[in-house]
Image (tube, coloured by chain):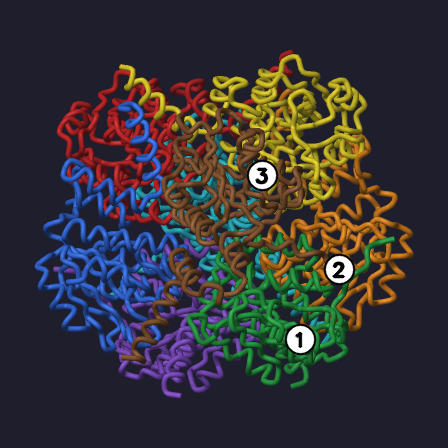
Chain colours: A brown, B green, C blue, D yellow, E purple, F red, G orange, H cyan
Amino acid sequence: MGQKYNRLDKDQAALLLVDHQSGLISLVQDFTPDDFKNSVIALADIGKFFNLPTVITTSFDEGPNGPIVPEIVERHPEAPFIHRPGQINAWDNEDFVKAVEATGRKQLIIAGVVTDVCVGFVTLSAIEAGYDVFVVTDASGTFNHTVQQAAWNRMSAAGAQMMNWFSVACELHRDWRNDMEGLGNLLSNHLPNYRNLMTSYFTLQDAKKG
Amino acid sequence: MGQKYNRLDKDQAALLLVDHQSGLISLVQDFTPDDFKNSVIALADIGKFFNLPTVITTSFDEGPNGPIVPEIVERHPEAPFIHRPGQINAWDNEDFVKAVEATGRKQLIIAGVVTDVCVGFVTLSAIEAGYDVFVVTDASGTFNHTVQQAAWNRMSAAGAQMMNWFSVACELHRDWRNDMEGLGNLLSNHLPNYRNLMTSYFTLQDAKKG
Amino acid sequence: MGQKYNRLDKDQAALLLVDHQSGLISLVQDFTPDDFKNSVIALADIGKFFNLPTVITTSFDEGPNGPIVPEIVERHPEAPFIHRPGQINAWDNEDFVKAVEATGRKQLIIAGVVTDVCVGFVTLSAIEAGYDVFVVTDASGTFNHTVQQAAWNRMSAAGAQMMNWFSVACELHRDWRNDMEGLGNLLSNHLPNYRNLMTSYFTLQDAKKG
Amino acid sequence: MGQKYNRLDKDQAALLLVDHQSGLISLVQDFTPDDFKNSVIALADIGKFFNLPTVITTSFDEGPNGPIVPEIVERHPEAPFIHRPGQINAWDNEDFVKAVEATGRKQLIIAGVVTDVCVGFVTLSAIEAGYDVFVVTDASGTFNHTVQQAAWNRMSAAGAQMMNWFSVACELHRDWRNDMEGLGNLLSNHLPNYRNLMTSYFTLQDAKKG
Amino acid sequence: MGQKYNRLDKDQAALLLVDHQSGLISLVQDFTPDDFKNSVIALADIGKFFNLPTVITTSFDEGPNGPIVPEIVERHPEAPFIHRPGQINAWDNEDFVKAVEATGRKQLIIAGVVTDVCVGFVTLSAIEAGYDVFVVTDASGTFNHTVQQAAWNRMSAAGAQMMNWFSVACELHRDWRNDMEGLGNLLSNHLPNYRNLMTSYFTLQDAKKG
Amino acid sequence: MGQKYNRLDKDQAALLLVDHQSGLISLVQDFTPDDFKNSVIALADIGKFFNLPTVITTSFDEGPNGPIVPEIVERHPEAPFIHRPGQINAWDNEDFVKAVEATGRKQLIIAGVVTDVCVGFVTLSAIEAGYDVFVVTDASGTFNHTVQQAAWNRMSAAGAQMMNWFSVACELHRDWRNDMEGLGNLLSNHLPNYRNLMTSYFTLQDAKKG
Amino acid sequence: MGQKYNRLDKDQAALLLVDHQSGLISLVQDFTPDDFKNSVIALADIGKFFNLPTVITTSFDEGPNGPIVPEIVERHPEAPFIHRPGQINAWDNEDFVKAVEATGRKQLIIAGVVTDVCVGFVTLSAIEAGYDVFVVTDASGTFNHTVQQAAWNRMSAAGAQMMNWFSVACELHRDWRNDMEGLGNLLSNHLPNYRNLMTSYFTLQDAKKG
Amino acid sequence: MGQKYNRLDKDQAALLLVDHQSGLISLVQDFTPDDFKNSVIALADIGKFFNLPTVITTSFDEGPNGPIVPEIVERHPEAPFIHRPGQINAWDNEDFVKAVEATGRKQLIIAGVVTDVCVGFVTLSAIEAGYDVFVVTDASGTFNHTVQQAAWNRMSAAGAQMMNWFSVACELHRDWRNDMEGLGNLLSNHLPNYRNLMTSYFTLQDAKKG
């Protein structure tokens, strides 16, 4: 008998966005700025598209770390937003843990800045607390590739699943027929080459009809 | 006592080719186009050479994803070919699962586009269903190296074995004497430097005879 | 005495966008798709912001090359748009050359796909015709880094100046005071880390006022 | 139930600095010299800031391996310093093991040169002896990336946790409020981009007051 | 006035293929074997497609350097083939120079193995002799990237133009209408992603008709 | 006869530091933060060590660009410091040009952020004005490697000499005997591996004496 | 309690060198040729220095694969040398297994060409047979980095330990005092930078005496 | 008419080896240590093989820079060896210039450590003095790739030719028949893959005779 496939389910998953702040993001160098911005917004869009309960948190956002990037709040204006007064590991903040518990979900999709700390610590704490954790590797950034790999290693060894925003979207969606246009828009907005495929295709289709 | 070597066996293995479609392949950037094309065709040739039961599937091949690349169908004209109407994970498609079951094999050699979704989801489902999965890493492509590594991590953690087309061929063949010319041709067609070794060698052999 | 600084001037420059087509862009692998999309749109925005006379051309846009990406036409709906019936070098097309001449400008800012052909050939022809050419390297894409470097070498040896979209914008703008908000928006939209600087800064400014 | 989070605790952790010698460091090529120097000193500063019991050791420091780099001893002048007469694995040296035992700590933060030997062997021995080991990957250097990855693989497979100096600092500190200025100084001294965030922020704050 | 565009012309150009031998190619490491094989054959196909006078030469092809790769001779069975008895620089071989002169062409398209020697020396000699040289960078290989770049630098400084097989094909062809199917086949055979564009396109066209 | 060697001379050279501001530096991604910080401070130290007339300038340092990094002003407290009110090219600011002229030097050593704009534009203007320009490539940073290379290409084509802080120091110093300890300190502070050589050497020398 | 440290012991270890043949090595591209040659010879020297029972095997060495490289046989002229008539996995060859058994050792140090097949298959079979396997990653080569990483993944998941020649030497040697000159020579011959440290050191020592 | 090919001639060339010292080489990180060592010794072997007049120089070789590596002196025991007392640019040392003049040669093949200073300064001075300079790029090392490229740029702009040891050897040798065995040995000793070609070839030849 094989191993159980711990599969993302849109009715069991919540989204945690940790410390995507304007100052902290300037520390990220394991992705190009364009790639990282695209992945973070794509993930925020996924949360919205699938109506995932979403929890936002920041660390000292009145200091050098800077405020959360506006694109996240625009997409999740009503999400609980925990401004931590000092705890580095968001799980050490009671309000954050309560907000997560209030989602009633057992699958946590987590991304943040920086991967080794803001994502890593929450991930390890959440696993200890009995949650299933899915780390969105491309929407989480850090200082350089070496640090990224060490952080992945630690989280993976603890049982977290390493994913990327595209596979999160696809695993939640299951079947294109659930909302073909919705998923198509998501991909068109965040995968330039998929957008190009659609542009070519629909242009030809229109020509056919014309 | 050591761990059991879960070894590919040409009488126990089937080949699953997932979504090698002309549109989707344009998304692949973790290999050069020449390298990727060569690996995919090499794997299709392996399936043919070893008479592996082969199952082909595509996702929405009348839309932007495009049709399957012709080189695959040419080599496997009689393989069951499942055109999925919407399921992203091919294992969610009953016809596909039935086609796999119909092979009667328990070892599944899987490759496809993109690695994190089309390969990853099938792999995790197949493992859950009790199959042994061998992922052909170089005949599976995706958006970039980060996504590739996250996908490998997830599949490997679930027990899939990470291989490449050359090691698949060699593990299936076992002994050159089973068909020296056959394996030689396979390598000559898909490993340019091996072809060069053969060219140099046979030229010298011919000179000797001459 | 030093060498004359051949400097971009918004009253002397025209923008040529060559073959940014949905099919051809899928060939580009010397930039990530996000980076390339961002640079191309940034350049189109520059043309609009500085009211540069702009000429658009495509090659066989009813065939596999695909139509121009919509973001370009949206920003330049009234630009002359030359659909070339077969000429690979746009300069071999009389309508294109006339459109360029009609701009009355002597400085040509050129970008396109692929760098070695669609950009390179026009660049060499335009230089021969007496124009000053400024190649926008990051809004021009091609197959891989080796081809990119060979193409730069050839164009540079002929006297073209190698630039990037950001330096084009800055050289055209000359002084922030000419339109502080306008340039700020341009940078905020296309340089994620500059946007972050602005987010942090204005949040603090607002806090001060509040 | 999830896996226990084995979390660094400043009252349970000791710091082991292994063979950061002036000669041996010239062998390190998996980091730039500036990056490596910065990480090693940052880690030494962490030891001092958190008052971690620290053990220093060197191998043949009167020969070609060279003496310990002075920055370490300056920060830890009273740490036990074991000059090993020949043992390659520091754990084979009784004095070293006694010094570690004398710390009374069960969590060992280990860094050194070279990663595959001086760090790797101590790590494996310490795990066997029942300690929890946290390897500081960016303050440990070796010949090249391949060797680095093989060493990580071996240590990780044995249960060591892969970390970096920044995550070590953050996991030990837990809450900024424990010493805001202290942690701020540490980051300012060793993360140039964080220092820049602080410079921008405090300049604006001062302007507000002025 | 601008600089004269020294443009490839199919009636003025000859193709020189220097030392693409089975042994020597095993020294090439600045390209993947698949990429290099593809580029070399693409260039040989270009020579055939445009009926370029072609000269082939090898160095000691009965020794360790090995024979010419068969794909070249298959495409140019009647090309003069100079087996050099010892001259490293093919231009030092009278028969080779005569064969080049016999083409009556002044534009020489040159590729070979290794770039720094077999291509570089011929290039410098041919320029001295008054020819225009176009080096095909991706059909010329050598030991590593550093050597490649030094070789490009030397040839470029002497006035050679750095190109790639695709730009050579396009510059020779000038206009798709000269032979749309011919150029299409060439690209389809050697640019996997262009082949994919064509596959998608013609499948849709067929569907339209069907 | 050979080409005149345009050699840095400490009595003919001035140092221009352009826009090394805390906000702008967060845009730099063609060097690691540690490497870049080290190179910039090394260059500032060189200016001080050789008593080079030094001119500092910033762009909008009260806005998002942030203030100059403090390490520069600490080393050059009396250098003319031009806070530009809007000119992107510092050479468009009269005060800056006057400050440069006031140095009475004809050789300008220039570094800044970002390379393609703040360094590039000043460089091209200064060359036009008859100065000899020496760009310090590793103390000048920008968005990514592609932009860096385009900027180098443009400046180099105009006649600027590409250098690095170490070669600037050595060319100015000429002979170790001019101040052995001074140069030794400079290298020890900014070349970790040279510091290690000195540590090993002097330890052995001391042992000899002891 | 910690995990048992499975440590190399010179009285329990044997060395297996698999298919380091002159033809096959031309396929290796995951290391530079100089690096790979150096590592392979270093490992052969280690076998000799520690008197490890050594088994050599080749595959079809009269065909294109070529003979074993002479440096190995020179160092191990009396080692059992199994010329396999066709088995790809050396463990499928009875003579090879018998030769391994005849060493009486339970720790197998394995290296070869190519990593994914010649090393990987033997490793997995030997683990199944109850041996402890230590793979020498830098003395094992293959087609490219992707294949290398897949092969490491598979072997590591089966319990093989990933090492490098330097850590093998150090773990076997245990204490410099066991043979200071012997180990020094080994390092001096195969680590150029260590040789440099020794050159500097002994020159200074000699100067002291002189 | 083409440009004169400035070609290396063994009767006109001298070899200058600048500061290949055991300490300074530890600063080199733009090549792997094995690659760099191999290239330096290969170049020294070339000097010996072609009987080139050779001049050796070092900087402060009794201090931290360390003595010259022994492999160079072993190959050129009678070459003039200038121990500079302080001049950084060897051309500032009269004895060195005299030694160069005494060779009576006008072509100077130069390599050394570090590229940007020890090689760069001599190169620029020698060109000014009327010599033709050929820089051996792979036998010259420096801190990192950025510094390497800046140094190449400066030397190339001044008219130096960028070469590598292999092309130097081939250009000097001209024709294999001048000494087939001699050149064969040189290549066999320094090009592992060429050695492999020879091993395969001669083994087959011997088999033929046997």
Q: Position of residue C52 (x, y in %)?
A: 15, 54
Numbered mark located on residue A101 in the image = 3
Residue position for label 2: G18
Q: Position of residue A104 (x, y in %)?
A: 58, 43
Image side of residue F73 versus residue C168, left or right: right
Numbered mark located on residue B98 in the image = 1
The residue depicted at 43 percent of the width and 34 percent of the height is A24
Mark 1 element type: helix
Residue under disc 1 on the same chain as residue under disc 2: no
The residue depicted at 77 percent of the width and 28 percent of the height is D86
Image side of residue B51 versus residue H165, left or right: right
Q: Is residue F141 above or below residue H174?
A: above
Q: Position of residue B96 (x, y in %)?
A: 62, 73
Foreground label between 1 and 2? 1
Q: Amino acid at mark 1?
A: Lys
Q: Is residue F99 above or below residue C92?
A: above
Q: Amino acid at mark 3?
A: Glu
Evaluate if marks 1 and 2 touch, with contact meaning CB atoms under 8 Å apart. no
Depth order, front residue of B61/A25: B61
Depth order, front residue of D185/B120: B120
Locate residue F199: give its quadrant. top right
Q: Amino acid at mark 2?
A: Val
Foreground label between 3 and 2? 3
* Chain of the residue that carries numbered disc 2 in the rendered image: G
Query: How many angstroms separate mark 1 from mark 3 (CA)?
Result: 40 Å
Q: Is residue F192 visible?
A: yes
* Chain of the residue that carries numbered disc 1 in the rendered image: B
Mark 3 element type: helix
